[in-house]
Amino acid sequence: MIKKILKSSLSHLIIIFICILSVVPFLWLLSTALKGRAENIFAYPPVFIPKDITLENFKEVLKLVPILRYILNSLIVAIMAVVLNVVFAGLASYPLARMNFKGKKIIFFAILATIMVPFQTLMVPIYMIVLKLNLIDSYSTFRGYLGLVLPFAVSAFGIFLLRQAFLAIPKEIEESAVVDGCNSLQIFFRILFPMIKPQVAVLAIFTFISSWGDFLWPSIVLTSEKLYTLPVGINNMSSNFGADYRLVASGAIISLVPIIIFFLLLQKYFIKGSQDGAIKG
């Protein structure tokens, strides 16, 4: 009994320690953003609670930098990426999970193998393709968005996640739909796809966060400041503000708000999807 209590206490202490490690950088960022000009943000020992809390840094960022435009660009790109990933991953995972055809396992393992290929190794050929297709923001705003989104329109992780979700659905449900006269597309859109909403929410959240925080690809493709996404805009902002870390911290805090809102809207499905997402089949 004592051994069990000690083991449980140790597990909780480790979890608490990891949580603290995760939260402290955010608290320091928030503290820096709320400190006034009179306070030393590099004081030692560190001071987490500002003496005089102020929102002037946020007002100054909104005044000096078109950060709302950056947020709008990131929202458009992230939402497009979420929609394309959910649709394409769903359409690709459905036959891999519910249909029988030659080479199915080979195709599935080939898709999984792409996870091991770093994006940096594919950057040059992808950029050349985007350039040949004129999907650069110098041609038009819409093409600029497409150039940002299309290289990430589907992922092996998304196909794997939704395939496992489809495998968990009893075969009898699909057979009943066939008896009622449904074709494959009707079975997919009307019956099976609505049943995997939790896993779709998990994929949507991961895709949104990944697209929202992506810096490398947008910094290569974008040439016009009016299409800067938030990470590129914040990087440009930090160079413009120089050593004023209060403004940089304020911009970073503003950039976190849409992610938090998106997660809160889907958290019910995310938690259920995480619980139901054990590998099966």
Image (tube, rainbow, N blue to C red):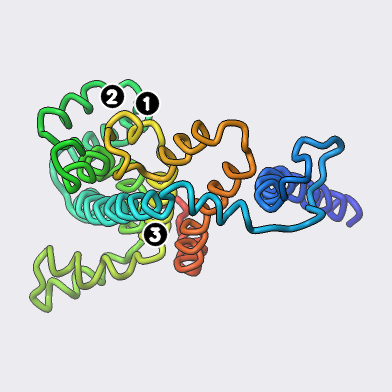
Crowding at label 2, few (<14), some or many (≥20) Cα neighbours within 10 Å? few
- Identify the amino acid type marked 3: Gln
Q: List x then y, in percent, for residue 281.
A: 37, 50
Q: Residue pushed farthest right?
A: 2
Q: 97 left or right of 78?
A: left
Instruction: Name the image quarter holding residue 143.
Output: top left
Would you name the residue on which mark 3 appears?
199
Of residues 223 and 263, the one drawn nearer to the viewer in this rendering: 223
Q: Earlier in the sequence, mark 1 or mark 3?
A: 1
Tell me whether circle 2 and circle 3 mark residues in contact (CB < 8 Å).
no
Is there any visible trace of residue 164 in the rendered image? no
When the figure is inspected, residue 46 is found, relative to residue 204, above or below; the finding is above
Instruction: Name the image quarter holding residue 79.
Output: bottom left
Q: List x then y, in percent, for residue 280.
A: 41, 52
Q: List x then y, in percent, for residue 131.
A: 15, 28
Q: 133 left or right of 213?
A: left
Q: Which is more foreground, mark 2 or mark 3?
A: 2
Q: Earlier in the sequence, mark 2 or mark 3?
A: 2
Would you name the residue on which mark 2 appears?
122
- Identify the amino acid type marked 1: Pro
Crowding at label 1, few (<14), some or many (≥20) Cα neighbours within 10 Å? few
Seen at 30% across and 47% down, the residue is 159
When the figure is inspected, residue 114 is found, relative to residue 192, above or below; the finding is above
Query: Which numbered tag is attached to residue 118?
Result: 1
Of residues 52 and 18, the one drawn nearer to the viewer in this rendering: 52
Which structural element holds mark 2? helix
Tell me whether circle 1 and circle 2 mark residues in contact (CB < 8 Å).
yes
Q: List x then y, in percent, for residue 54.
A: 69, 58
